[in-house]
């Protein structure tokens, strides 16, 4: 079984919705890194030196490769990435090798076989 790593950078108020939709579509878990900060193509506004940016979270999902694209699309929809500029991004990268995923493999085997 092969895996992809989905990395989602989302506004912190959308974290729970993104995690929920990812799980509903085949993700078996996630890691959340709180209070990330980023900049887009526009310079951020400040008010007396304080940033007006919303807080972001970094969500990491190791998912089975056949489920990855669908999960990625659902994350984008839940995070409203295309509807509202600056709300977040998500992308996937190949996972060369992984350990500690044997339980996930057992849980996913039937789901993936049905999709193939």
Image (tube, rainbow, N blue to C red):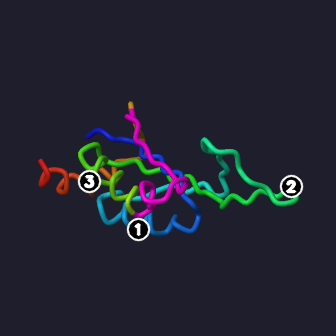
Pair 3/1: label in front: 1
In this rendering, would 62 be left or right of 34?
A: left
**Is-magenta flag for residue 82?**
yes
Which residue is labeled 3 in the image?
A: 106
Tell me the quadrant of the picture where the N terminus can be found: top left
Q: Secondary structure at mark 1?
A: helix
Q: Do the residues under discs 1 and 2 have CB atoms within 8 angstroms? A: no
Q: Nearer the viewer, residue 45 or 20?
A: 45
In this rendering, would 110 be left or right of 54?
A: left
In this rendering, would 112 be left or right of 53?
A: left
Figure label count: 3
Q: Residue at x 57, y 60 (%)?
A: 11
Q: Which residues make up the magenta segment?
A: 78-95
Q: Nearer the viewer, residue 20 or 91?
A: 91
Which residue is labeled 1 in the image?
A: 20
Question: Could you say which quadrant of the image residue 29 lies in?
Answer: bottom left
Q: CA distance from mark 1 to mark 2?
A: 35 Å
Query: x%, y% of residue 115?
Result: 14, 52
Query: x%, y% of residue 17?
Result: 45, 69
Which residue is labeled 2 in the image?
A: 49
């Amino acid at each position: 079984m092969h895996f992809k790593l989905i990395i989602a950078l989302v506004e912190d108020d959308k974290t729970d919705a993104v995690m929920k939709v990812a799980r509903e579509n085949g993700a078996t878990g996630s890691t959340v890194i709180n209070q990330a900060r980023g900049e887009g193509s526009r310079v951020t506004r400040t008010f007396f030196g304080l940033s007006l940016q919303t807080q972001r979270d970094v969500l990491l999902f190791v998912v089975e490769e056949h489920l990855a694209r669908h999960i990625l699309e659902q994350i984008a929809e839940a995070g409203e990435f295309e509807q509202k500029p600056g709300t977040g991004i998500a992308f996937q990268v190949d996972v060369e090798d992984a350990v500690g995923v044997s339980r996930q493999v057992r849980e996913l085997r039937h789901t993936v076989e049905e999709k193939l």
